[in-house]
Image (cartoon, rainbow, N blue to C red):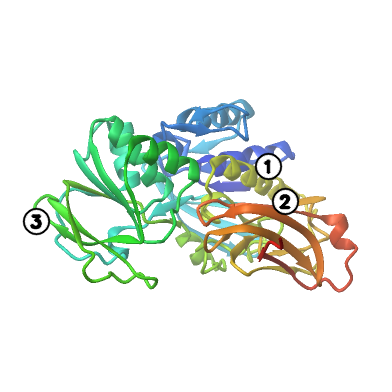
Amino acid sequence: MKHDLIIIGGGPAGLAAALGAREKGITDILIIERDRRLGGILNQCIHNGFGLHTFKEELTGPEYAARFISRIEEAGIPYILNTMVIDIAMSDARKIVTAMNEEQGLFTLEADAVILAMGCRERPRGALNIPGYRPAGIYSAGTAQYFVNVLGRMPGKEVVILGSGDIGLIMAKRMTIEGARVRLVAELMPYSGGLKRNIVQCLNDFDIPLKLSHTVINIHGKDRVEGVTIAEVDSKGKPVEGTEEYISCDTLLLSCGLIPENELSQQLGVELNPVTNGPFVNESLETNISGVFACGNVLHVHDLVDYVSGEATQAGYNAAKYIAGKTTGTAKYIPIRGVNGVRYTVPSSICIDNMDERLTVRFRVGAVYKNVKIVVKAADTVLMSISKKIVAPGEMEQVILLKNKLTEIENCNEIVIGVEVQND
């Protein structure tokens, strides 16, 4: 019941992390997955668009997952399914993982290192404060996706979607293909939360209206949804009087954001970033708890699964270095801070001694900016300046930090990444 490395979650992040650790020589690995099969959310994502970065070809979600699952099987990495982890605790330097399933009941495992790869969940209606009854016909977009793609059941025939996250956009297209009429997609913000390609392929190509700066202010119907009232909102998100519009529908899908699954992290004492709801991590994707790493959507919500896999592979590499005792825990850490429109960065701090020669720093902006440049500075030294025609919250950005450049800077106490207006 003792392992070098335990990975919590058998989705794209957990699978890639396991393969990364195995590649670096760790043989005693265990993946714990709560579902009945590996692959996570990919198993219900039957649309294509996956794998362009990782495999240089376009795959569906199940196909992408199958590539990683087959590599897990070939490597002989063990995993247990239908198993829920209910607690992680520390005992000296070792991590104690408590889990349960039907066969073993409640049991504990020990590990030298743990990788958190639990993914994320959708924001529920209760967090949106929409008044009205609780009739049948209200689903999260992900639940509707599961019904249609896995169970072969249609949630409804006339649909309104609240929120323009990628799952909502994809379901607008999917429901239309399956014969439903999608009346519109309403988005609270003045910009879409999804990828531009999904707006084009899922809405524009099917003539589905996208109403920005709009929200649902009432749900009509007692037993079944009969319609919703939408309204325009002001800059503070408050409905503008006189803009109300009734839309007849029998189904309301909610695509209002994703929340990293960090209840286990909080129990352990992992420090969470209030912006991302994921852990603060260093250059090794290690949390404030030594030997506990995080990757994928449990760390921050990604726009592409290819980026999840790349990040998780790196987490596996770094966990292997930790287990082998090749990291320096007492070295100096330099914070990375987002300024001028950059909401957060991952990682949020780095130790130059521990980082690889190249380090990818990912971040999101808080609004849509056009004709700007991304500027990275350290101790008033400009490390890089990248021109961008447009940056938007729906798409992650990234910069590459070079170790040799950072070591040349004297008195480097902070790295800042910000958006600046382009000079003509």
- The local secondary structure at tag 3 comes to loop
Residue 341 falls in image quadrant: bottom right
Q: Residue at x 58, y 47 (%)?
A: 6
**Residue marked by disc 1:** 21
Q: Nearer the viewer, mark 3 or mark 2?
A: 3
Residue 313 horizontal/vertical position (percent)? 65, 43
* Image side of residue 96 versus residue 156, left or right: right
Disc 1/disc 3 C-alpha distance (Å): 53 Å
Q: Residues within 10 Å of mark 2 (few under 14, many from 20)?
A: some
- The local secondary structure at tag 2 comes to helix
Q: Is residue 129 above or below residue 77?
A: below
For marks 1 and 3, the one nearer the N-term is 1
Kindly give the residue lying farthest to the front in the view shown.
424
Location of the C terminus (image quadrant): bottom right
Residue 418 horizontal/vertical position (percent)? 67, 65
For marks 3 and 2, the one nearer the N-term is 3
For the residues bearing labels 1 and 3, Cβ distance under 8 angstroms? no
**Residue marked by disc 3:** 222
Disc 2/disc 1 C-alpha distance (Å): 10 Å
- Identity of the amino acid at label 1? Ala
Q: Residues within 10 Å of mark 1 (few under 14, many from 20)?
A: many
For marks 2 and 1, the one nearer the N-term is 1
- Identity of the amino acid at label 3? Lys
- Identity of the amino acid at label 2? Ile
- The local secondary structure at tag 1 comes to helix
**Residue marked by disc 2:** 323
